[in-house]
Amino acid sequence: MAASQEDTPLFPRMLVFITRVEDEKKLEEVFDSMHIPICYQCRGKGTAPSEMLDIFGLSGTLRLITVGLLPRFMTKELFEKAEKQLSFRRRGGGIAITIPITGLQHPMFQMLNDEARLAVEKRIKERIEGEMAEIQEKSEYTVIWVSVASGYSDEVIDAARDAGAKGGTVLKGRRRNSERVSQLFGISMQDEQDFVMIVVPREKKAEIMSAVSTACGLKTPAHGIVLSLPVDEVMGLEE
């Protein structure tokens, strides 16, 4: 079964790279970095007049031809990476083109879709990791978020203050969890909760979290869950 262009929102393209044979490894690395499977690769000979070869920077005749498939939205990034790695602007670097595909076997389209999803997920993950690393490095404060059974917020605040916190904000709410979680931790599926938000200097985070977890953690009657989040920007806090 074939999927037509109208049925494929990825707008697949066939890409054709004509490069120097010695650039084979570099090109494969570029393809692998973007989860683009190489469908075909072969050697060829140029037949254009020497002046045309000079225009394209392809002096000589032996060429590496690489043909693959990718969604249209990935072509710009692919070309940027390939140009950086293979120096297409330099004489002899090679040429690359993309051609719209008007029909494609469904299994091939599914493979292309899966590879594109992996590429997008990878880029999102890399961006998140980079941004989080930057936040962790620059942030001076941390938010400690604690969820405990209703009525235990005072114990959380007391434990946090004893460990160096100046106070916190208490909110009322309800927890809903799966049957598996309830059985695993021995807590009800639905229960009234106190939520405590404490903003603390980053260097005090570990000590305060440890104190709150000891006093009101999962193994206590408070059944507390303690986590921390980096603060990007802050205003209104005084030492």
Image (tube, grey):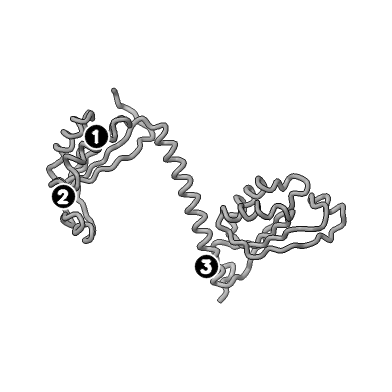
Foreground mark, 1 or 2, reads 1
Which quadrant: the C terminus?
top left
Q: Residue at x 22, y 39 (%)?
A: 196
Looking at the rendering, which quadrant does residue 98 occupy?
Answer: bottom right
Label 3 CA crowd tier, 10 Å (few <14, some 14–19, many 20+): some
Give the residue type at disc 2. Answer: Glu
Q: Tell me the residue that label 1 is attached to.
A: 208
Furthest-top residue in view? 239
**Amino acid type for the residue under numbered disc 1:** Ile
Distance from Cα at disc 3 to Cα at disc 1: 49 Å
Q: Nearer the viewer, mark 3 or mark 2?
A: 3
Question: Which residue corresponds to the image point at 56% horizontal and 71% vertical from the top-left?
Answer: 3
- Front residue of 47/101: it is 47
Q: Are marks 3 and 1 in contact (CB under 8 Å)?
A: no
Whether residues under marks 3 and 2 lie with C-beta atoms below 8 angstroms apart, the answer is no
Q: Is residue 34 left or right of 58 when viewed as pictured?
A: left
Of labels 3 and 2, earlier in sequence is 3
Numbered disc 2: secondary structure: strand
Q: Which residue is mark 2?
A: 192
Mark 1 and mark 2: Cα distance apart in space: 24 Å
Compare marks 1 and 2 and give the one earlier in the sequence. Answer: 2
Residue at figure coordinates x 68%, y 60% from the top left: 66
Residue 177's disc number? none
Residue that badge 3 annotates = 110
The amino acid type, in three-letter code, at marker 3 is Gln
Question: At numbered mark 1, what does the secondary structure look like: helix, strand or loop?
Answer: helix
Q: CA distance from mark 3 to mark 2?
A: 46 Å
Mark 1 and 2 residues: CB-CB less than 8 Å, in contact? no
Q: Position of residue 11 (x, y in %)?
A: 58, 62
Q: Earlier in the sequence, mark 3 or mark 1?
A: 3
- The percent position of residue 90, horizontal first and vertical second, equals 75, 44
Front: mark 3 or 1: 1
